[in-house]
Image (spheres, coloured by chain):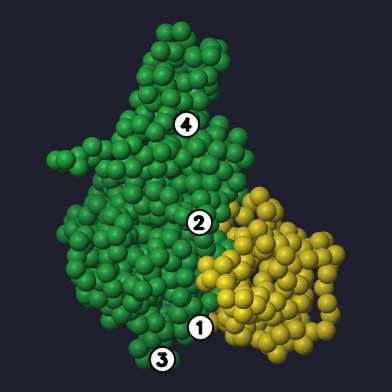
Chain colours: A green, B yellow
Amino acid sequence: MNTTGPDSPSRRELFRMIGSVAGGAAMYQAMSTLGFAAESTYRGPVDLSGAPRGASVLILGAGIAGMTAAYELRNAGYKVQVLEYNHRAGGRNWSLRGGDTYTELGGFTQQCEFDEGLYLNPGPWRIPYHHRGLLSYCKKLGVPLEAFVQVNYNAYLHSSKAFGGKPQRYREIKADYQGHVAELLAKATRQSALDAAVSREDREKLLESLRDWGALDADFRYGANLLASERRGYAKEPGGGLTARPLPSQPIGLTDVLDSGLWQGIPSGDRYDMQTALFQPVGGMGRIGEAFARELGPLIRYNAKVVDIRQDVHGVTATYEDLAAPGTKLQARADWCLCTIPLTVLAQIPMNVGAALHAAISAVPYSSAVKVGLQFKRRFWEEDEHIYGGISYTDLPITNIAYPNTGYHSAGKGVLLGAYIWGQNAMEFTAMPPALRVRKAVEYGSRIHPQYPAEFDNGIAVAWHRSPFTLGCYGMWSEAARAQHYDNLCQVDGRIALAGEHASFIGGWQEGAVTSALDAIGRLHQRAIARGKKA
Amino acid sequence: MSIRHVTIRLALAVLGLSAAAAQADDASFMPIADLGQANGEQIYQHICQGCHMPGGEGASGAGFYPKLAGDPRLASWQYAAVTVLNGRNAMPPFGLPEDRISETRTVHLSDAQVAEVVNYIRSHFGNTYADTLTAADIAPLPHPR
């Protein structure tokens, strides 16, 4: 059998086949997708040897891109200064914890009232194992990691339009979908329907693999037996002693599985950037930004709102307002400038660069995204439903509910990610006052976890288009804009280079920020060397 | 929240229907498929005001969202309509064909809806432009592809 040919019964082909039969209605508008799966270009530590004596770099933005660059350039001997709009470092690398106050655009202020040790990551929350650049800095900076659970077989797939609105366990939908498809394919194989695509020799191997893959019985059938229950779970679990004997569960029929649309949730961990292993920093994603900030110390100036960027033949001057002393304008100057300011903001800052870069800066719309963190009085998802970490997906406007991948079995309160939304529903959530977003997340979540109303304690909601420091979640490159503007965005313009997730093919991921920063400072470094020495 | 939706919610409350049933007609959200039926006011309140704020006052942080209240640029309906259709700087485009919106995670508004929301903006927040646009005015303008 040709396993790579167009007719090979690979898993992807099966999904496609079933998808086209079912019409492929898009039930989940944004199921776990984030950016484009592209491999990190990280190839180990950057070589910046031979920095000209006294050469300086001004870095705008103390997010992951800016601080990666500051860390490396400082270590290479450059004089580095970083300007940051916020009163903290990290940018979108950020965790909201009890005691934090967050004021979004429009002046809506929220107090985070989570208990000690509990947090919401409003921005990035998972790190794939192949994001080697970011992981290398976690290692260097001593940021401890723990497992992030992307797929939890006991979490839910939920459609308000299927099974009377009752959430289904992931393991049941997956086992039943896979079992039925295997049975169908085995039937077709045995009826010689696939003879043109499958050689006689491979036929038996295919059948055996289908039996294995789908948990089929000796007659290539998927049904209410212990074989299938080993995948989907039992009606009565096996145990010890006199109550030991298990009872098989009844699979959901093929038609019901297909009609429900829940099969769309099955491959949520199959994408390259969602594959096990994934990580999260212990204590919240913000620990990375905090560790960078500790490392860089006084090199970062906070509360600095950049209002003008001007280059001349000798260097670059940024004018900024000191937000701690309103009305005060200050200037910072260096030989070179690495600008990591999000394009939303940068497009509004006067800067003397070429027309091509200007056009590129204005060519990328930023996405709308919303996260809501909900604190509950107890970890009922563990106590009542045996869900330890992972994500439930739903067609309701909240899109998903994610359970903490840490602190299992803790007494006391727990925080869920009560909503994580893109697209139209994110825009609608953004248009509401924060308290209403929290209330809506509780209302909708109650349809999946009826414990919500009794156990809800408090919540906090972050809508990225209301974020004062980014005015959006991340840059959404269309293919056409990418073709026309991406290279121009990344070119060094005189003494200024841009970096950030927006200057990468890993949009919306921190690895995009790391790799774009390393790429940009490598090229700035070459220019600095070419100049012989300082300017 | 539109009057129509308030009425539905009140009616459900009077009938004593469950909270779950009421949520099916939650005025806070339009079913994705129903966005095409939204009028200018609904589009503004469900989408635009996320950035431009409920009173059209805009906002300022590291960057800013322009205020629509008393914005002299709104004297040009073409300026407003082209901005809604194509976006401006990092503002998402709302005039992409329906099959192209997922690429940049935006939403699609028809020409009639673009006309409606521009009419709404130019006749609210202290703006008093009297001319009323229709889909026919929007159609000849440059659309994103």
What residue is pinned by disc 2?
A165
The label number, if any, that marks residue A326 in the structure image: 3
- Quarter of the N terminus of chain A within the rendering: top left
| Residue A424 or residue A349, whichever sits in front | A424
Label 4 vs 2, first from the N-terminus: 2
Dot 2: chain letter? A
Type of the residue with mark 4: His
Mark 3 or mark 1: which is in front?
Answer: 1
The label number, if any, that marks residue A106 in the structure image: 1
Q: Which residue is drawn at 28% across and 81% down?
A: A99
Type of the residue with mark 1: Gly
Q: At numbered mark 1, what does the secondary structure look like: helix, strand or loop?
A: loop
Seen as rendered, the residue at the extreme top is: A200
CB atoms of marks 3 and 2 within 8 Å:
no
Mark 2 or mark 1: which is in front?
Answer: 2
Label 2 vs 1, first from the N-terminus: 1
Q: How far, Cα to Cα, is label 3 from label 4?
A: 66 Å
CB atoms of marks 1 and 4 within 8 Å:
no
